[in-house]
């Protein structure tokens, strides 16, 4: 098949020959300073680079060029996202699954993992526990099982989550990470008020994909890969891509995910809202030694840098799969969203003692949300619980145009600071609150629009008095 970024055929917009040609071109030009410099000059415009250009930068081993890539990624991250880091938590509803994915403990042949599906009352208790931490944004997860986890269950769960108002707590944005489905079902998810629809490709290498997914609905490479087009056709504005680095060669995956981003821009008019960068890690019934493509830290950091350069406007997510040390290093290179206080087991937030027997993967960063918020602020970042753009209808191309114009700073900066103020007032430890108040005072002065800054200061005063949920 021929490569066509506008095609709706998976093997044309993620074209194997195009990926291999791009990798071959990268190998030939990895020391070509003329080519490398031209790519970097283009990247400095902060409008992105192509998948082939990204492949060249990834392949390059020249130390000073790699340092320039790193610095450029940091500059682009600062330009579009400043020091804001969006906070979220995953919420696992059910680990029933009919697929046979060889890298996931939820695979249907794993008989020693306890199978759990939360009732609506159990979901309510989980959400209250998350609200008591201070979370405002969730990503719900469930295995693929049309009997145990039908779409109706997901829709009912979303309604339950949004309905719960506990003390000053409320979940204001529910992102959804569930299996590929039909356009009609995506419309139902849109109507339920979801934020971002997230679906990890796992691997873009078709042959490897089919081997890694030997049985179950997920075995269908085309249906899975074309899901984002169906989601956007169903009315969902914001979609989130991801691969599981370590299943295939990282160079191949990097080119694949950037081609997918280019395809969405070409075919749907707007690229992905987020890109996630998980790495294969240990879990029940899964031995990471079975996967020979595991990505070392240095390469992982370069992958994050190049994705940030290639798609400057796309949010980047890192989970608690990664250690505190790794998360700290990649925050400056491109990551704009992280989870905090996460449990990857079904019903994990109401367990008094962490029980990972039903977990999808091992958590490396086990700190509480307050500890993560405290840590971020000590590093100079602004933990943000903001959901304003989603709730104001600034999604899809409307969000991207705001971001590209640079006007988003007059929304995101004050919204981040006001939601941080809410967290400090309602949930923070005394030490975290002290650090946060000082940070807010300093960062308020950096809001460029004087009238916005003045209004934000007034809102902060009202938050101090007990009022909640102000936004620009």
Image: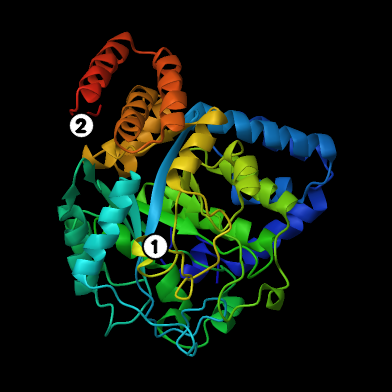
Check disc 1 and report its element: helix, strand or loop. loop
What residue is pinned by disc 2? 468
Q: Nearer the viewer, residue 110 or 68?
A: 110
Q: Which residue corresponds to the image point at 53% horizontal and 68% vertical from the top-left?
A: 361
Q: Which residue corresponds to the image point at 64% horizontal and 48% vertical from the top-left?
A: 326
Please tell me how crowded label 1 is: few (under 14), some (14-19), or many (20+) other residues with Cα within 10 Å: few
Residue 173 image offset from top left, x and y in percent:
27, 48
Q: Nearer the viewer, residue 390 or 322?
A: 322
Q: Which residue corresponds to the image point at 73% horizontal and 57% vertical from the top-left?
A: 296
Which image quadrant for residue 408?
top left
Camera sees residue 45: no
Q: CA distance from mark 2 to mark 1?
A: 29 Å
Q: Nearer the viewer, residue 347 or 187?
A: 347
Residue 259 image offset from top left, x and y in percent:
54, 56
Check disc 2 and report its element: helix, strand or loop. loop
Residue 284 image offset from top left, x and y in percent:
55, 77
Q: Image quadrant for the N terminus? A: bottom right
What residue is pinned by disc 1? 352
Query: Is 309 above or below relative to 195?
Result: above
């Amino acid at each position: 098949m021929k490569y066509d970024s506008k095609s709706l055929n998976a093997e044309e917009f993620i074209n194997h020959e195009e990926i291999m040609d791009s990798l071959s071109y990268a190998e030939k030009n990895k020391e070509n300073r003329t080519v490398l410099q031209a790519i970097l000059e283009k990247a400095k415009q902060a409008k992105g680079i192509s998948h082939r250009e990204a492949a060249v930068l990834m392949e390059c081993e020249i130390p000073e060029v790699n340092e320039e890539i790193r610095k450029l990624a940091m500059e682009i991250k600062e330009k579009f996202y400043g020091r804001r880091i969006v906070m979220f938590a995953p919420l696992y509803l059910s680990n029933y699954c009919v697929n046979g994915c060889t890298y996931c403990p939820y695979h249907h042949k794993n008989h020693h993992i306890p199978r759990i599906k939360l009732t609506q009352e159990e979901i309510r208790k989980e959400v209250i526990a998350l609200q008591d931490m201070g979370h405002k944004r969730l990503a719900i997860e469930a295995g693929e099982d049309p009997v145990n986890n039908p779409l109706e269950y997901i829709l009912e769960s979303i309604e339950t989550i949004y309905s719960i108002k506990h003390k000053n707590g409320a979940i204001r944005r529910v992102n959804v990470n569930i299996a590929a489905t039909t356009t009609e079902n995506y419309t139902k998810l849109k109507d339920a008020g979801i934020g971002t629809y997230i679906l990890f490709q796992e691997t873009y290498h078709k042959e490897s994909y089919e081997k890694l997914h030997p049985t179950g609905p997920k075995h269908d490479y085309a249906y899975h890969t074309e899901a984002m087009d169906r989601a956007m056709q169903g009315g969902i504005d914001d979609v989130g891509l991801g691969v599981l680095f370590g299943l295939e060669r990282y160079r191949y995956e990097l080119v694949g995910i950037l081609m997918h981003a280019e395809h969405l821009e070409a075919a749907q008019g707007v690229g992905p809202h987020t890109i996630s960068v998980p790495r294969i890690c240990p879990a029940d019934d899964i031995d990471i030694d079975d996967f020979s493509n595991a990505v070392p830290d240095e390469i992982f950091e370069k992958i994050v840098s190049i994705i940030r350069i290639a798609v400057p406007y796309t949010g980047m997510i890192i989970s608690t799969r990664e250690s505190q040390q790794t998360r700290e290093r990649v925050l400056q290179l491109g990551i704009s969203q992280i989870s905090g206080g996460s449990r990857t087991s079904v019903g994990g937030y109401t367990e008094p003692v962490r029980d990972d027997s039903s977990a999808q993967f091992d958590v490396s960063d086990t700190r509480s949300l307050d500890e993560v918020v405290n840590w971020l602020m000590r590093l100079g970042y602004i933990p943000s619980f903001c959901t304003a753009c989603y709730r104001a209808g600034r999604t899809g191309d409307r969000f991207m145009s705001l971001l590209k114009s640079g006007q988003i700073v007059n929304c995101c900066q004050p919204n981040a600071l006001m939601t941080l103020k809410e967290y400090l007032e309602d949930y923070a430890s005394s030490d975290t609150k002290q650090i946060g108040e000082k940070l807010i005072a300093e960062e308020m002065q950096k809001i460029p629009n004087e009238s916005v800054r003045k209004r934000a200061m007034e809102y902060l005063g009202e938050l101090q008095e007990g009022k909640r949920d102000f936004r620009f």
